[in-house]
Image (tube, rainbow, N blue to C red):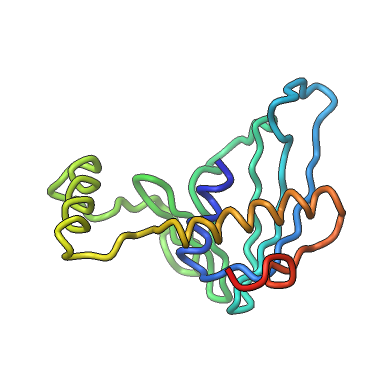
Amino acid sequence: HGIHTIAGVRRVFGEVTRVYVQEHKTGSFERSDLEGTMTALVTAESGVNVSVVQSPETRFTGNTGGYMLHGESGSIRAGADSYELLVDREDPSPRLYPPSKLSSYALEFQAFTDYISGDELAPTTGYSERKTLAVIQAGAESVDSGNAIDIRERFGRL
């Protein structure tokens, strides 16, 4: 699932320049076919640092789904169906996104037809996904080496 998360990070925050990842496995984690808990610090070209945690072994409690963004004025937790603004003097109750006239499947189909008709650019390309895969590979290399990996030093111009 991490590759989808990194693709989303790139889409929101821009190109990744540096990645540092550590892995932890609990003593009771017996799956040899999966990584343990992966904790990453990803740095975008803008200088923004994004912390990413992916875990098949840890059972988090509370509202940990979706994405949590922290800024100097507050935070926002964005889930699949709603979001919460965590700002001084704001009601932190979940807020639903504006309703859509189309289902999520219909929206995907509409995006596809817009693309093949030439009305829209594709949201992703093989070139773009190669950049995402480079971040994932750099993350694996970071785990193995214990060092942060500079994407351009490692892969050159992608």
Q: Image quarter for residue 15? A: bottom right
- Does residue 32 appear left or right of residue 157 in this picture? right
Residue 80 point in image, percent of width and height: 38, 45
Q: 63 or 51: nearer the eye?
A: 51
Q: Residue furthest bottom?
A: 46
Q: Residue 105: x, y in percent? A: 23, 40
Rendered residue at 71%/44% (across/down)? 38
Above or below residue 106? Residue 40 is below
User: Image point 46% across, 65% down: which residue?
Assistant: 12
> Quick one: quadrant of the C terminus?
bottom right
Q: Is residue 58 left or right of residue 146?
A: left
Q: Nearer the viewer, residue 99 or 45?
A: 45
Q: Looking at the image, which residue is at 58% across and 79% down?
A: 46
Residue 111 picture location, percent across and down: 22, 53
Query: In which quadrant will I find the N terminus?
Result: top right
Using the image, determine if residue 62 lies above or below residue 53: above
Above-or-below relation of 99 to 76: above
User: Residue at image x 61%, y 35%?
Assistant: 61
